[in-house]
Image (spheres, rainbow, N blue to C red):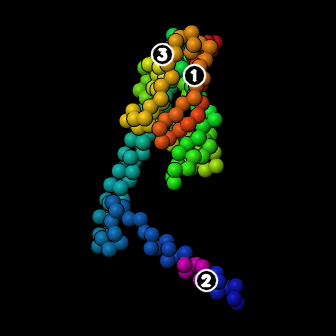
């Protein structure tokens, strides 16, 4: 008998939650919805369906545009003349987090064409990947610049084509953000 009461209580709670979370078209409250005639309710559902479909189409178009832009960047990097693309990694790095505490960061690598705008880098804590530090990386063909937002507190790696061909490694320190090793080189050509 006790088991039966438990299931009845569970069923009643579920029904209360479902009815309390009614999702009426066009953001209407339950009171507004119940004042409509069946024809008006049908029209409201129809309008909501049209809005939902338009939003789905917009999202699909945006995703297609983002995928096309990403494919274009990949092709640009793949076909670029030697020296126009740089590959960089930040390793053995620590980041400054809350309470002025430094924590080890996961390594990160990036490939970038010199014509690209500054690329955002999210460096994550090794022990808590939900915490990160955001930096920007820029490459102008001979200089790699790593900065906090708005080009503040930057560190720059300058090198010649010959140096980047071999690869350059140097210690970087971005004030109040990151302390680690930056390695950059021109990618090997296939």
Circles 1 and 3 in contact, beta carbons < 8 Å = no
**Residue 77 visible from this viewpoint:** no
Q: Residue, x 61% and y 17% (percent of image)?
A: 167
**Residue 143 visible from this viewpoint:** yes
Q: Looking at the image, is 28 positioned above or below residue 104?
A: below
| Residue 69 point in image, percent of width and height | 45, 28
Q: Residue, x 56% and y 36% (percent of image)?
A: 179
Farthest residue to the bottom: give it. Answer: 1
Circles 3 and 2 in contact, beta carbons < 8 Å = no
User: How far apart are the alpha carbons under marks 2 and 1?
Assistant: 66 Å
Q: Looking at the image, is 65 positioned above or below residue 31?
A: above
Q: Residues within 10 Å of mark 3 (few under 14, many from 20)?
A: some
| Residue 184 point in image, percent of width and height | 57, 22
> Magenta residues?
8-13
Q: Quadrant of the N terminus?
A: bottom right
Q: Tag 3, which secondary structure?
A: loop
Dot label at residue 142: 3
Q: Residue, x 49% and y 19% (percent of image)?
A: 158
| Residue 108 point in image, percent of width and height | 59, 34
Q: Looking at the image, is 58 positioned above or below residue 21?
A: above
Circle 2 residue:
8
Q: Which mark is first along the chain, 3 or 1?
A: 3
Q: Tag 1, which secondary structure?
A: strand
């Amino acid at each position: 008998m006790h088991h039966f009461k438990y299931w009845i209580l569970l069923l009643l709670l579920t029904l209360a939650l479902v009815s309390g979370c009614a999702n009426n078209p066009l953001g209407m409250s339950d009171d507004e919805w119940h004042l409509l005639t069946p024809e008006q309710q049908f029209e409201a559902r129809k309008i909501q369906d049209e809005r939902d479909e338009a939003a789905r189409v917009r999202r699909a178009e945006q995703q297609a545009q983002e995928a096309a832009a990403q494919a274009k960047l990949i092709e640009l990097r793949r076909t670029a003349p030697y020296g126009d693309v740089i590959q960089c990694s930040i390793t053995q790095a620590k980041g400054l987090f809350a309470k002025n505490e430094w924590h080890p960061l996961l390594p990160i690598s990036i490939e970038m064409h010199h014509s690209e705008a500054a690329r955002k880098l999210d460096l994550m804590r090794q022990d808590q990947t939900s915490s990160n530090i955001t930096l920007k990386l820029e490459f102008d063909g001979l200089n790699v610049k790593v900065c906090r937002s708005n080009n503040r507190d930057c560190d720059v790696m300058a090198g010649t084509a010959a140096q980047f061909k071999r690869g350059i490694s140097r210690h970087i320190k971005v004030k109040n953000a990151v302390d680690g090793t930056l390695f950059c080189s021109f990618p090997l050509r296939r």
